[in-house]
Image: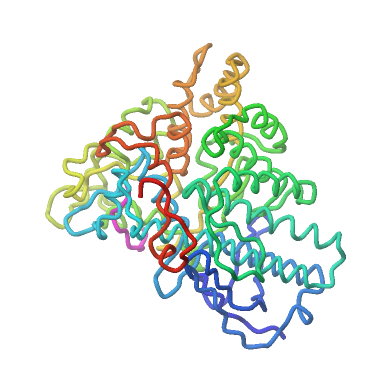
Amino acid sequence: MLKKININTGNSSTDQTRFKSNRLWVALLSLPIAAISLLFTGGCTDLDETIYDKLTPDQYGQTEAEIETIVGRAYATLRGYRNEEGPHFPTEFVWFLNEVASDEATIPTRGTDWYDKGVYQEIQRHKVKPSNDVVLKTWEYLYSGVAAVNGIIFMVDKSQLSDAAKAKVKAELRGLRAFYYYRLMDFFGNVPLQTDYTDTSLKTNTPRAEIYKFVENELLDIVDYLPEKGYGKFTKNVAYTLLARLYLNAIVYKGEPEWQKCIEACDKVKGYILEPNYFTNFLKNNEVSKENIFVIPYDEKVTIGNYHQSLTLHYKSPQVFGFSAACVNGICAEPGVYSKFDSTDVRRNALLIGPQKDRKTGQTVLMDNGNPLIYTEEISNFENAQQNEGVRMVKYEITPSDQWERSNDWVIMRYAEVLLMKAEALLRTNQAALAQPLVAQVRARAGLTTPATIDLDFLYNELLYEFMWEEHRRIDQIRFGKYGQPSWEMPGSDKNMEIFPIPAKALQANSKLVQNPGY
């Protein structure tokens, strides 16, 4: 019998993931692969395994059922992992890096809380140093995923499955790897490209345009082999949505627009709708959504890093919502964001402002200093904010049974994005009349009407309202040419700051890496 292996992803002793579409727990059998060492990333991950049974690809991974458990390990990497240096979770570090760098969110220092060597101040002001820990954890999370997928592809290649079966299994794996490289290219620009598990040589930076081409070619090559559907899986629809994202931002990534390709990719996404209730997509059991295209499944019973809601709410929030989980009073909306929303826009309910009432007494909760807990839109001093300042995130459903970890699946892609990507590509190709009905669908769901004629400025604002807290704003700002413009607590930045620095730790470990310009 195959015994458990500690794969160091921050999971409990039984490594499990929820494929909640069929309400089953799928136990992910641990993998008999060697320790992965990514020298080209600066030794960034600790994926060493404690192997209790000595198994080789000749002994395990010979049947489709066994391969399915191996592929499950690849999906588990999306949730993040924890090693001796701490957590590496997309619901914290990747999320923070995207949100705080944009004009959408901020993490003010509150007394001694949330200073953390100034890392959030650096991100807010577009003055990020290569030593920034948030940048490092993001790099490590993404490359650990690449490393794991490369190792699993190696196992599949060594298995006795037929070539046809291998192509089908590897399609999902290559799709996940393309997703990781898409994010690496987006964050860091010129990054090492490594696809061969057996190659341990140091790698230098690959130009961003070449990473773009790699991601595009991988997705086009595998799409016909991908499954039609599967909750939390890399399906055909996920591939086409990722291709549409890639093409939408081609002007950023390779310096040439691909608007028509974006439109064509959007048209190939099938079988999804706009949920009548916007917040269905973010329920605790959001597997019911017919809009969510790709999610990272999480479960509160498995400690794996979905504590994003705890990162925004005040320390006293358990009294407000009735749960017992701790909250750490961190990320909030930048001043002015809440006021941009129309008062009748249902999406504004993703933002929490005003007096916070005790669930039991109905009285306004008091902070430790005796003042009432009233969230304000204004933040008086970014470097020394009051505990109650800043509008908070409540987009994902909160319930009285919530723990520090939560069961809401993390939404990566949903159908509203497909509609608005197509609308933008149409606008950029002078087809505003065709774009307007697509935007109108999204706004009607929010309870709003849409002008008969819309332009890119109108759409730019709409993207904020629709995707607040979903990691879209930074790349939207870059694509619209607004990222470096002065804004709240950001005096302005040059174009070099549109990508982040290669972490100092990676540079120290790999002499072939070259730092990005401006750092």
Q: How is the image coloured?
A: rainbow
Q: Quadrant of residue 63?
A: bottom right
Residue 91: percent from left, percent from top:
45, 55
Nearest the camera: 228 or 149? 149
Pick the residue in front: 353 or 429.
429
Query: Quadrant of residue 75 in the image?
Result: bottom right
Number of numbered discs on residues: 0
Q: Residue furthest front?
A: 512
In the rendered image, residue 324 lying in the magenta stretch gets the answer yes
Q: Residue furthest top?
A: 452
Residue at coordinates 26% horizontally, 49% vertically from top-left? Answer: 121
Predominant secondary structure in magenta? loop
| Quadrant location, the N terminus | bottom right
57 falls in the magenta region: no
Is 377 placed above or below 504 here? above
The residue sitting at 16% across, 49% down in the picture is 384
Q: Percent from the top left, x then y, of residue 127? A: 30, 47
Asked whether, in this view, residue 236 is left or right of residue 315, the answer is right
Span highlighted in magenta in the image: 323-331
